[in-house]
Image (cartoon, rainbow, N blue to C red):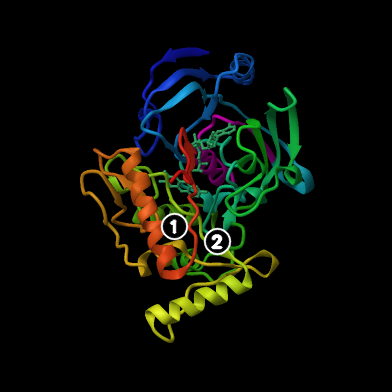
Amino acid sequence: METTSATALRDLTTLRLGGPAGRLVEARDEAAVVDAVRRADRAGEPLLVLAGGSNVVVADEGFPGTVVRIATRGIAEADGEEGRVRLEVQAGEPWDPLVGRCVAAGLAGVECLSGIPGSVGATPIQNVGAYGQEVAETIRSVRVLDRARDAVVELGAGECGFSYRSSAFKRTPGRWVVLAVAFELERSAASAPIRYAELARRLGVQLGDRAPLAAVREAVLELRRGKGMVIDPADPDSVSAGSFFTNPVLDGAAFTALERRVAERLGEGARPPGFPDADGRVKTSAAWLIERAGFTRGHGDPRGIAISAKHTLALTNRGAGTTAELVALAREIAGGVRDAFGVELVPEPVFVGHAWDER
Ligand SMILES: Cc1cc2nc3c(=O)[nH]c(=O)nc-3n(C[C@H](O)[C@H](O)[C@H](O)COP(=O)(O)OP(=O)(O)OC[C@H]3O[C@@H](n4cnc5c(N)ncnc54)[C@H](O)[C@@H]3O)c2cc1C
């Protein structure tokens, strides 16, 4: 365990934004994580658990407490149920190398999640997903430190409350610190059925077909690179927190109201994208709404905060930006979509040291 003070959090985030941490503790094994969290709790200090820093928007003022950086490593393989393979992975393991390892070993179930930055332990927090797959499909259990009970417990997948880009962990922030995640994967050289139209087209297969694991990983990485969604020091569009807003999920009446607003504004015949979701609700596209509300790729300050030149949903820091400017642009976009279409956009990343709702 290594403790330092006055570290600039911008150095630990993919947006390269955020002021100083009160104290930074780097924890390299489970016992060190538990110890660091318990010490902070007993001292009554505010606590931030941070790993890859790819899904946080940290205030310019920083975080006036203890930041525990999860740097644990280790992957244990065992037999799972019905011939599957069980991988128990330490929270600090980087996610994409794990996906690469599974693909190379002929283990199916996470291949569409290639290229997502960050750690394994953060994947259950927002039920990481992309290209028609999400981690909830393969997570079997999550070992956590439950700060409310001061106990290390194993939560089954059913107790994690997974939903679209959310979970019990995200809905009750700070209660659980993820120590390790157990996945169960199919032994198969072919992928899980492809559910995402753009990926199926790229692979030259029909929706519902399977494709070789390595081909799926390559296709996903190519699609993501084209959108600046793979971290690349040579790509300024990848200096982001990924998608800044989640796709709105609307009930039937709200989606009908949206269809009416779209027709009024864009002309009869114009229709918002709509994908059936749970409980009769409809998921629409945040990127489509942002574009139709008049925001274009690249909008913003070419040397500061701007919409990615490759993907309307990502807000980027071109170098000289601040968190205040990022939040101002995000509010301008959300306000534009609200005024044009009556839909409320919700940010996907976690705000640290400030809140989205502060006005
Ligand atoms: C270019 C880019 C593309 C992206 N694409 C996608 C995508 O396709 N799909 C997607 O779902 N996400 C995407 N993301 C978002 C992000 O990569 C994921 O949410 C990732 O899982 C975050 O991991 P992290 O280790 O960086 O978490 P951090 O940013 O360090 O933390 C995020 C949140 O999780 C909490 N947390 C982290 N680790 C733990 C732990 N061990 N225990 C408890 N809480 C913890 C933190 O406190 C914080 O609230 C993208 C981000 C970027 C920058």
The mark found on residue 185 in the picture is none
Element on which disc 2 rests: loop
Q: Residue at x 50, y 31 (%)?
A: 51
Q: Is mark 1 within 8 Å of ligand 1?
A: no
Q: From this view, report whether residue 319 is shown above or below residue 204.
A: above
Residue type at tag 2 = Ala
Q: Position of residue 154 (x, y in %)?
A: 75, 32
Q: Is residue 105 magenta?
A: yes
For residue 238, say whether it is visible: no
Disc 1 + disc 2, Cβ < 8 Å: yes
The stretch drawn in magenta includes residue 116: no
Could you say whether the residue bearing mark 1 is in a helix, strand or loop? helix
Between 60 and 70, the one nearer to me in the picture: 60
Among the two numbered marks 1 and 2 on one chain, the one whose residue lies closer to the N terminus:
2
Q: Residue furthest right?
A: 82
**In this view, the mark in front (1 or 2):** 1
Exactly how many numbered labels are in the figure? 2
86 relative position to 307: left or right: right
Side of 154 relative to 7 (left or right): right
Q: Position of residue 311 (x, y in %)?
A: 35, 57
- Above/below status of 284 relative to 35: below
Q: In the rendered image of this protein, does residue 321 appear above or below residue 137? A: above
Q: Which residue is mark 2?
A: 211
Part of the protein shown in magenta: 86-106
Query: Label 1, label 2: how many angstroms apart (C-alpha)?
Result: 11 Å
Residue 124 in the figure: left or right of residue 22: right
Q: Residues within 10 Å of mark 2 (few under 14, many from 20)?
A: some
Q: State the residue at coordinates (21%, 44%).
A: 303
Please tell me the numbered disc located at residue 219: 1
Seen from the viewer's position, the closer of residues 171 and 209 is: 171
